[in-house]
Each structure stands twice: as C-alpha cells, then as structure tokens.
Amino acid sequence: MASTWALVPLKSSERAKSRLAEVLDAEQRRQLFFALAEQVIVALHESRNIDAVAVVTSSLEVAEFATSLHAMPILQEADVGMSPALESALRSFQAMQPERVLMVPGDLPLISARAVDAIFEAQTASEQVVLVPDRRHEGTNALLCSPPQAIAPRFGSCSFTRHLSAARAANIATRVVEIEELALDLDCADDLDYLRSHAFERSASLLAPLRLATASNVPLRAALVG
Ligand SMILES: Nc1nc2c(ncn2[C@@H]2O[C@H](COP(=O)(O)OP(=O)(O)OP(=O)(O)O)[C@@H](O)[C@H]2O)c(=O)[nH]1
Ligand SMILES: O=C(O)[C@H](O)COP(=O)(O)O
C-alpha cells in the first residue's frame, strides 16, 4: 500500500486562473491551467519519495485529465475552496493510512522531481511538518505533513504565516525550506513576467501554445495595452 501520497487540488477549468483575466483570454487561461497541472503531476510522479498522486476536484473533465496522467481523482460536489477540498481529500485517505501527504497547488511552473525530492531531504526524523514558502513569503507552495493530520491545511491569503503559527501553537516540530523551483506560483501578470524573465525556456514551452504575441522583455500588461 502506498504510504507517501501527493495531493493536488484543482479547480474546474472554467473558473481557474481568474486573476490572469487581464492578460489572458478564457481559452488561454484554460490551456495554461492544464499545462501547469500536467507539469505538477508529472514532477510528483517522478519524485523518488512519492508513491502515488491524487487530484481533488469537483470537475469531471479534470478528473478524467488526472486519470490520464495516472493520478487518482477524488471527486467533490463543488469548488468550495482549496483548503476545504484538501481537508475532504485527507479524510478520504484515512482508510489507506498513508504515512505522509505532500500538498502542492497545481500552478508551479518551475517544479521538477528534484525540487520535490528536496522537500523530503530537508525533513529530519523529529519534524512532522515541512513548509515551502512562495517567493514573497506570503503563500505556501508545498506542505508536507507526516502524519497527514499533523496540521490542517490553511491555504489562502498569508497561508505561510498561518501554517507556521498553527504548527507552533500545536508544538509541532516544523522545517521551513526555501526551494527556488517551488517558489513561483503563477497567479497574476507579474508572476507571468517573472517567469518570462527568469526562466526563458520553461516559459517559452508553457506560453508558446497560448500564442501570446509579445517580446519576452516587454511586461505583458504593457504589451497588451500598448
Ligand atoms: N479542488 C479545488 N481546488 C481548488 C479550489 N480553489 C483553488 N483550487 C486549486 O488550488 C490551487 C491554488 O489555487 P488559487 O491560486 O487559489 O486559484 P487559481 O485558479 O490558480 O487562480 P485564481 O482564480 O486567480 O485565484 C490551484 O491548483 C487551484 O486549481 C477549489 O475550490 N477546489
Ligand atoms: O498559499 C497558498 O494559499 C497557495 O500558494 C495558493 O495561494 P495563491 O492564491 O497565492 O495561489
């Protein structure tokens, strides 16, 4: 039985990436959502520390997509937010009694198996929680809980501080590890610009199918307005 699971929450594609609406149209956001999610799921599968990958979603389309990538879909009735989705998925894991669960959002464009393995390598035997902050130290881009119920997921605004405080309040030994390839999540136009200026090849492979007719050194918002 698999004992280390990775868990990826994925919204319905038509609601995803809404903060990018100022620079991408609906079809571009949909394509980007699936391209990012595929990268995340593939990297998790390739990690030598992960036995199985699950996707929690309310969308049948996303569930089929997850299955096509050999991830186990966990279906919900509606999009109720990232943390409630993760909590209900964790409850459905209980029968399988995994030793640990790694929770990762589906929008990390620079993720790799090596970066995922670095999370596990950072954990010492006494530590039940590992947190990977985003580049602004506001969000959490990976949360490893061993056991899975060590702390409840509290994703959303300022989740990094909230996860840290929850672990401290419960007196749970916690490791914070900064991992460059996991520090960027693609939420807004500034994040897309950061990706285009810091990781040319990865951004080209993600953005070329979207047919964004802008030079890589021109900020997206300015290019589209001007
Ligand atoms: N299953 C599920 N996943 C969610 C839900 N809300 C967010 N997620 C996922 O959680 C991760 C982080 O989501 P957000 O950054 O809040 O949402 P987003 O769609 O990427 O971007 P915005 O629409 O701009 O907020 C992504 O993988 C989302 O698809 C939800 O209600 N249910
Ligand atoms: O910390 C979080 O909640 C996750 O990184 C998702 O946050 P986001 O809304 O910044 O993507």
Image: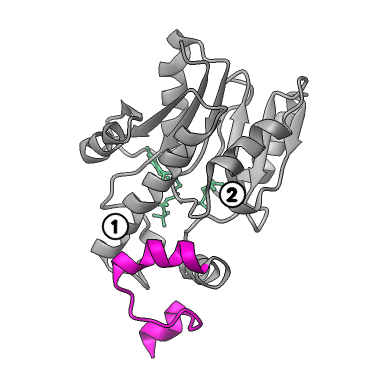
Tell me if 75 is positioned left or right of 83 in this view: left
Query: Residue 52 magenta-drawn?
Result: no
Residue at the spot 30% in from the left edge and 65% down from the top edge: 209
Answer above or below: position of 55 versus 112: above
Q: Which mark is residue 31?
A: 1
Q: Secondary structure at mark 2?
A: helix
Q: Quadrant of residue 68?
A: top left
Q: Position of residue 110 (x, y in %)?
A: 52, 54
Q: Position of residue 22 (x, y in %)?
A: 37, 72
**Identity, as a three-letter code, of the amino acid under mark 2:** Leu
Q: Position of residue 78 (x, y in %)?
A: 29, 36
Principal secondary structure, stretch drawn in magenta: helix
Number of dots carrying numbers = 2
Render colour scheme: one colour
Q: Nearer the viewer, residue 100 or 58?
A: 100
Q: Quadrant of the C terminus?
A: bottom left
Q: Does mark 1's beta carbon lie closer than 8 Å to ligand 1? A: no
Q: Nearer the viewer, residue 144 or 149?
A: 144
Residue underneath mark 2: 182
Answer above or below: position of 87 versus 21: above
Residue 42 is at least partly visible in this image: yes
Q: Which mark is residue 155?
A: none
Q: CA distance from mark 1 to mark 2?
A: 21 Å
**Identity, as a three-letter code, of the amino acid under mark 1:** Gln
Residue farthest toward the bottom in the current orientation of the protein: 226
Answer above or below: position of 155 versus 108: above
Magenta highlight range: 200-226
Tell me if 189 is positioned left or right of 35 in this view: right
